[in-house]
Image (cartoon, rainbow, N blue to C red):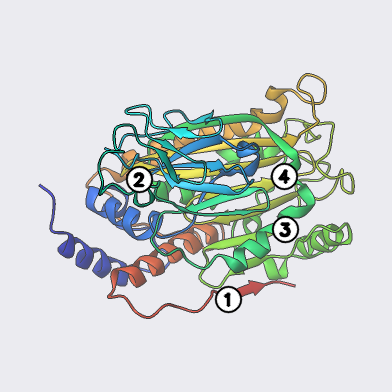
Amino acid sequence: MQKDLTAVRSEMLEKLERRRPAYSLDREFYTDADYYQLDLDLIYYRDWVFAGHDIEVAEPGQFFTLQIGDYSVFVTRDKHGEIRAFHNTCRHRGSKICLTEKGHAGGRLVCPYHQWTYELDGKLMYARGMDSQQKFDPNQHGLKPVHVAAMGGYIWVCVAEQAPDITVFKQLQEQYFAPHGLRDTKIAMESTIIEKGNWKLVWENNRECYHCRTNHPELCLTFPETPSITGVEGIDENIEMQNHWKYCESLGFPAKFVIADNGQYRLTRVPLLPGADSYTMTGKPAVKKPLNPRATTGIGSLLLFNYPSTWNHGLVDQGVSFRVLPLSPTETQLTTRWLVHKDAVEGVDYTIEGLSEVWIATNNQDRRIIQDNQAGILSPAYEPGPYSVEQESGCIQFVDWYTEAMKDRLKPQSKAKARPKLRVVS
């Protein structure tokens, strides 16, 4: 029996307000269907969500779809070259229009049910059998748009009626990703897995490398376990990091640590282990053709996270993006894409195995870890435990962001807040 939503909101707010600092969340936050619905309503249905890459809709009529909770969305490019996003729901009787994950609609979008036909900009151009109805106005039955923003090779969507201001983040992402030239890449490999855990457990696992040494032997060949690299604390005093930023910026690669004042997103460049330039079994680039000829070695990895939907790596030879979409209180979809230079030839400049084997292994290891974590939390014996301040500052930062965001959104609506400030480590 479903609880009264008002009561659930009050209960959730009370739990968040009495949460112990640097401790994990109460069991309901990882297991309860009503809490999960509030996560969708107040996070995924309000914030910008990473959808995919603009190279996936390089031509007019190309499209890809994604599911954000109950919302089916598709992204396409219209005949004027503008990227568009729409609710994947026909304005006749609601059938899905785009039925596959990716495809090419040609010059128009046709509902497969009754053939209502739309322009690529969403306007209704043909509705069979409706001409005789005098009160029917095609202009009132176009596809419902979804907010969309393209930046630095990435596409973001927001299903809210009013989308949050994304101006500052857009400027930062374009600045940091510009040297990687992701608009001149192609997707060499894509993988989607289902992790049997709450979306917040997926994020907590990502935000620390406390578990890496015993669980990720492939990743640890190149990725440092230094807590300040995965987390957010101690970066100010890390001399190696400061020197790395100076080197990267001398090559024209923005590198300094930047984080939103509310903690929702962060960008920085971090060094890999000595002698490593990419996430491969040898540490050598997996792709012979670099993304940018100005840097073929030594720039490490560009790290970006933006809650709730994505973390990313930008390297000399490839870009790797991860998209996090919740499916249920205890299931999360993780999609990983590997981007290489558009002129790189598979079998000549790279192999799929060499490109993806480290993250395929790491993702599968994380899938097991998260499933085990979720199974333990399902036990009534679970109670919130303390994070390691030294090793898990990234977890603390994520849960603090979630706590404050939810507390703010569970309370009666206040006036719109000012644009988020940034913390920059120089």
- Kindly report which numbered mark, 4 or 3, lies closer to the viewer in this rendering: 4
Mark 2 nearby-residue class (10 Å; few <14, some 14–19, many ≥20) = some
What residue is pinned by disc 3? 176
What residue is pinned by disc 1? 421
Asked if residue 335 lies left or right of residue 226, the reply is: left
Q: Say which label, 4 or 1, has the lower sequence index.
A: 4
Q: Say which label, 4 or 3, has the lower sequence index.
A: 3
What residue is pinned by disc 2? 69
127 vs 10, nearest the viewer: 127
Disc 2, SS? loop
Mark 1 and mark 3 in contact? Answer it, CB < 8 Å: no
Q: Amino acid at mark 1?
A: Lys
In the rendered image of this protein, does residue 104 appear above or below residue 24? above
Mark 3 nearby-residue class (10 Å; few <14, some 14–19, many ≥20) = many
In the rendered image of this protein, does residue 376 appear above or below residue 230? above
Gap in angstroms between the C-alphas marked 2 and 1? 29 Å
Disc 4, SS? helix
Q: Amino acid at mark 3?
A: Tyr
Asked if residue 335 lies left or right of residue 110, the reply is: right
Give the x, y percent position of residue 239.
78, 65
Gap in angstroms between the C-alphas marked 1 and 3? 18 Å
